[in-house]
Image (cartoon, helix red, strand yellow):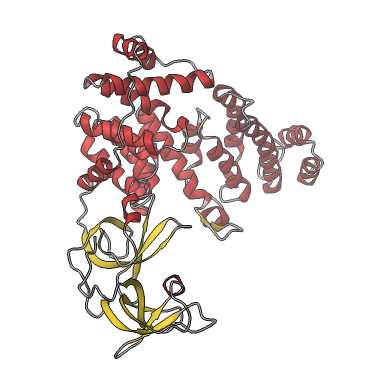
Amino acid sequence: MSSKEIFALRKAGRAAEALTMARTEFPKHPDDIWLLRGYAWALYDHVKKVLDAFEQGRLSPSALSSDMTPYMQEFSMMADPLRGDAAFSQILRLAKDAAGGWGDFLSFARWAGIDDFDDKGKAPFVTNEGKTVDSLQMQFKRAICRKAALLAGSPQPDRELLEWGRAVLEAALKDAPDDQWLNYYQSKVHLACGEVSLATKRLAPALRRQSRAAWPWALLGQILERTQPDDAVTCYAHATQIARDEQEIAKTRICLGQLLARAGRFNEAAHQVVKALRYREEQRYRLPPELESLVNSDWYRRAVADYSQQAMPDVSSAARNLLRSLDQRPISYKTGVVEHINADKALSYVALSATEGIPLYHRTFPEVVSHPPGTLLEIGQADASGPAQDWRVAKVKSLPGFYELRLGQMTRQDGHAFAFIRTEPENVFVPPALANDFLPGQPIDITCWAIRRADRSGKIGWRAVRIVDRRALSIPDQQ
């Protein structure tokens, strides 16, 4: 029997026979690299079948572990010569995909290590849509770090396994200090160790990048719950208000209800309990003890009986102020002007110079949408080339040489959606969005706010961003 026959059986869909043959031949030829590859791929077929059943909901986590662990133990007993081979990398890919439900993942990962992927597994790859995806090696590291963070929060963790996982996490952070997921996992480890300030510091990068996601706000609430309960309420409430799916904040509502009840805000607490209870009833989930305790409380029964449950007010402003206060990085401000608002991409684009600008995404800064083009803003950044961290309306009314009040005569030509205002020493281009308000062929004296910007060809010139009534020559209020 040969490796070719093992591969042929696999190709014919006879995976069980392929594995039986590999097991039979392995003791006879333990150093035959092709036999080892055939053996590994036969195991791959069986593990993949188990993983597919789990992902389709046909296996529980305990059943996944029961079915998967023997195959992976078998692989670990024969696969050392395959380190650096594609077959080795692909088995590790399955392990990574199963990590969320597979109880023995960390033990297997410690045997496998993080260095023996093939060259393809160590390199990032680009999807058909042009998106760059992290390497398999990096994804495997993240799976280890995630499980280590979960292990750190368990009542009786395997200390040796936990220390190995923490070492992987610390090394990964040295290589990628700004990785939001690694910082998130390190924050959870610090929280499990009672290191509140370190947990907060580590969470900041994830919270800055994912400020419109519920999960980092929920974790910040956990971090602050003991030392800053009022701020924890803000975090939990914000998480519930921005969550896209009730499943995301099922546990968060319980935590929020508990904190509100402790603060004597019983009607608001009751509202959270009702939501948490309804979700579990709809999903037919068992009620956790914490929720049962809230449901059986006197204040909850009273609130339900007299229909006094009360939703919490919007806390988005308080949440942003809290994030700003927790972010210890120095922020510097640049003055710019809202050049345009892109409704499709939900952003306001702020020009900072003739060739530079920065987007303010409405999901992160919802209030900025109320400020029209031509509004002067101060944009706060922690890094000169990084994303916006803060914004505020500027106190200045103009930026000489960049954003000025310009006066002249405009005539829109027939067949042209744009126009020009004749001024000295340079004309001002009027884009279609503004020029369409004027009839062709009709000369008119115009006063406008104009910005000096580069066009698509790189040529720098003046462009109108706001038309001002000619009779109002004083600089208008930027508010």
User: Which residue is at the front of the view, 168 or 365?
Assistant: 365
Farthest bottom residue in view: 425
User: Which residue corresponds to the image point at 37% horizontal and 54% vertical from the top-left?
Assistant: 175
Q: Is residue 419 above or below residue 187?
A: below
Whether residue 157 is visible here, answered yes or no, is: no
User: Which residue is at the front of the view, 51 or 313?
Assistant: 313
Q: Position of residue 223 (x, y in %)?
A: 27, 33
Image quadrant in which the C terminus is located:
bottom left
Q: Position of residue 291 (x, y in %)?
A: 38, 16
Q: Position of residue 133 (x, y in %)?
A: 52, 54
User: Which residue corresponds to the image point at 36% horizontal and 36% vertical from the top-left?
Assistant: 239
Q: Is residue 305 above or below residue 90?
A: above
Image quadrant in which the N terminus is located:
top right
Residue 238 vs residue 36: left or right? left
Quarter occupied by residue 354: bottom left
Whether residue 89 is visible here, answered yes or no, is: yes
User: Which residue corresponds to the image point at 28% horizontal and 76% vertical from the top-left?
Assistant: 470
Residue 265 vs residue 248: left or right? left
User: Which residue is at the front of the view, 141 or 17?
Assistant: 141
